[in-house]
Image (cartoon, helix red, strand yellow):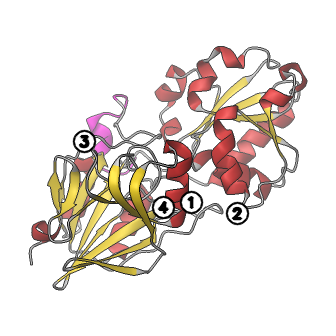
Amino acid sequence: MRPEDLLTPTPAGLGCPSGAFHIDPLRAVDRALITHAHSDHARAGHRRVLATQETLDLMRLRHGDDFAGATQAVGYGEVIRLGDVAVSFHPAGHVLGSAQILVESKGMRIVASGDYKDQPDPTCAPFTPVACDVFISEATFGLPVFRHGDPAGEIAKLLRSRALFPERTHLVGAYALGKAQRLIALLRGAGYDEPIYLHGALETITRYYAERLDLGELRYVRDVPKSKLAGAIVLCPPSALNDLWTRGFPDPIACFASGWMRVRARARQRGVELPLVISDHCDWDGLTRAIPATGASEVWVTHGAEEALVHWCETQGLSARPLHLVGYGEEEGSEVPAEIGAADSGGPA
């Protein structure tokens, strides 16, 4: 069997004709297999959805109880047969409930990674390489310039800034699903045991995480006069950093946790005073570790810096091609910034 006979790009996204399903479809379909709950991968309106229990729960929180006609929870490692195809879900290390999906038929094994990272993360199951013939990899940070470093070092930078400026509020922009909760866990792991304050937009998903993880004392900005939050760490959606909502905090310091903060021009454009390079995606080193670990002889690359990662795969003797799927680019984004020039894509930076 050729890989293209098992999974093929369609206008709705990656489809499997013999199994009658799509993976992370871009439009409503009869049967959708969902890798994780970020909105560009987990859309509402499908007739049937298969995903991990956490992903289904998070989709309900984000889209409402009627987000799909029917749902089926699939545990990690559980094998489901759909027509002539066997599928199973395996940890992706991206956010809570995230999964790679293994599609297998007639001896051909293809893994669709969804979004993934191989850095340790206390808020989700760690990425597990799955042996396959074809690995479908994201490339959000698929350029050698992107090396995220140690998240603990970025948290230490935030805590040093707080110690230097105890009279100021630190407002930390963080995406509502995954990033905000990971930051809280990292702060707790660094010994920060004071209350952490949350923008209302982060409340629902953080409460779901807190039912499963010890995130310490969490409070909501709406319950406290902003003028009383000198020295506090406040998490908010990135869009709130440039909103009227920031008024009233004591001389706030705008911080933003994202892999894109490696690009200084991106931080300046957003008015970020304290960039924190913390990502829920693989950086270049993570991508080039994860791909060989699968044992795949062929790699399909999607959403991000596709050409650079394809070139690297070819230098390693792997067959590789870009999928050119459009419509993906989760909250952290997958567009290669204009500030990253072609000179940065050819080798380590």
Image quarter of residue 190: bottom right
Report if residue 174 lies within the magenta region.
no
Q: Is residue 183 visible to us here?
A: no
User: Which residue type carries mark 2?
Assistant: Arg
User: Which residue type carries mark 1?
Assistant: Leu
- State which tag comes first along the sequence, 2 or 1: 1
Residue 98, which numbered label? 4
Q: Is residue 134 visible to us here?
A: yes
Q: Mark 2 points at which residue?
A: 212
**Circles 2 and 1: CB atoms closer than 8 Å:** yes
Looking at the rendered structure, the secondary structure element under dot 1 is loop
> Residue, x 38% and y 46% (percent of image)?
43
**143 horizontally vs 98: left or right:** left
User: Which residue type carries mark 3?
Assistant: Val
Please rate how many residues cluster around mark 4, counting C-alpha atoms within 10 Å: few if below 14, some from 14 to 19, many from 20. many
Up the image or down, 122 lies above or below 223; here it is below
The magenta segment: 338-349
Please rate how many residues cluster around mark 3, counting C-alpha atoms within 10 Å: few if below 14, some from 14 to 19, many from 20. few
Please rate how many residues cluster around mark 2, counting C-alpha atoms within 10 Å: few if below 14, some from 14 to 19, many from 20. few
Q: Mark 3 points at which residue?
A: 326
Counting from the top left corner in percent of width and height, residue 268 is at 53, 22
Nearer to us in this view, 305 or 2: 2
For the stretch drawn in magenta, the main secondary structure is loop
- State which tag comes first along the sequence, 3 or 1: 1
